[in-house]
Image (spheres, rainbow, N blue to C red):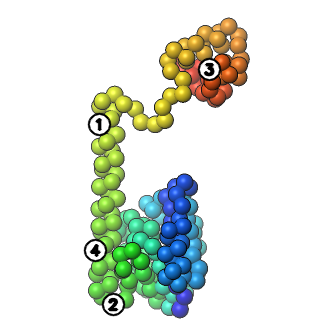
Amino acid sequence: MAIIGYARVSTTDQDPQLQLDALNAAGAQRIFTDHGVSGSKAQRPELDACLDHLREGDVLTVWKLDRLGRNTVHVLQLIEQLTDRGIGFRSLTEGLHTDGPMGKAMLTVMAAFAQLERDTMIERTRAGLAAAAANGRKGGRPRKVDDADAAKARQLKAKGITAPDIAKMLGCSRATVYRYLSEN
């Protein structure tokens, strides 16, 4: 029997160290880690490798249930496949495991709550974006160059000045200049 860990972070900016530390403390002999992969994606390279690596008697261990997946049906299907192969499952944060009927029942309930949490977060994000748009605010990165500077860039370009020189004059990148020149 081996404890095999799986960790996942959704963006490349995030650090999986907290998960890795917890999995190591739980006795994981090997840990597979997906970086920059959303939990809603069915195909995750390291999870696929982990599932291939698992053998009968092993226990797949995750730091938190939502690291395995946020879709209840997908998580439960994965765990059912593991159970059919004689592989256990354990989630450290929630204290869930597939030992016995109570563990399986609690796992089902917690997977449903994980999906509810994700769906609620998506709903709030969409509502916030809609409210911002209704108030005239646009999402995304603020403009580096204001409308006056964009107009100035167009005038300078019309006079034959190159984009790199315009960028130096305005204190922005050449790519920014090209973007504003292409707007009109």
In space, the residues marked 1 and 4 are separated at their CA atoms by: 33 Å
Which tag, 4 or 3, sits closer to the chain's start? 4
In space, the residues marked 4 and 3 are separated at their CA atoms by: 57 Å
Residue 47 visible within the image: no
**Residue at numbered disc 1:** 131
Q: Nearer the viewer, mark 4 or mark 3?
A: 3
Element type at marker 2? helix
Which of the 4 image quadrants contains residue 176? top right
Which residue is drawn at the image coordinates 33% and 33% (left, top)? 133
Mark 3 surroundings within 10 Å by alpha-carbon count, few (fewer than 14), some (14 through 19), many (20 or more): some
Mark 4 surroundings within 10 Å by alpha-carbon count, few (fewer than 14), some (14 through 19), many (20 or more): few
The reply, left or right, for residue 139 in relation to residue 14 is left
In the image, what residue type sits under mark 3?
A: Leu
**Residue at numbered disc 2:** 100
Number of numbered markers: 4
In space, the residues marked 2 and 4 are separated at their CA atoms by: 15 Å
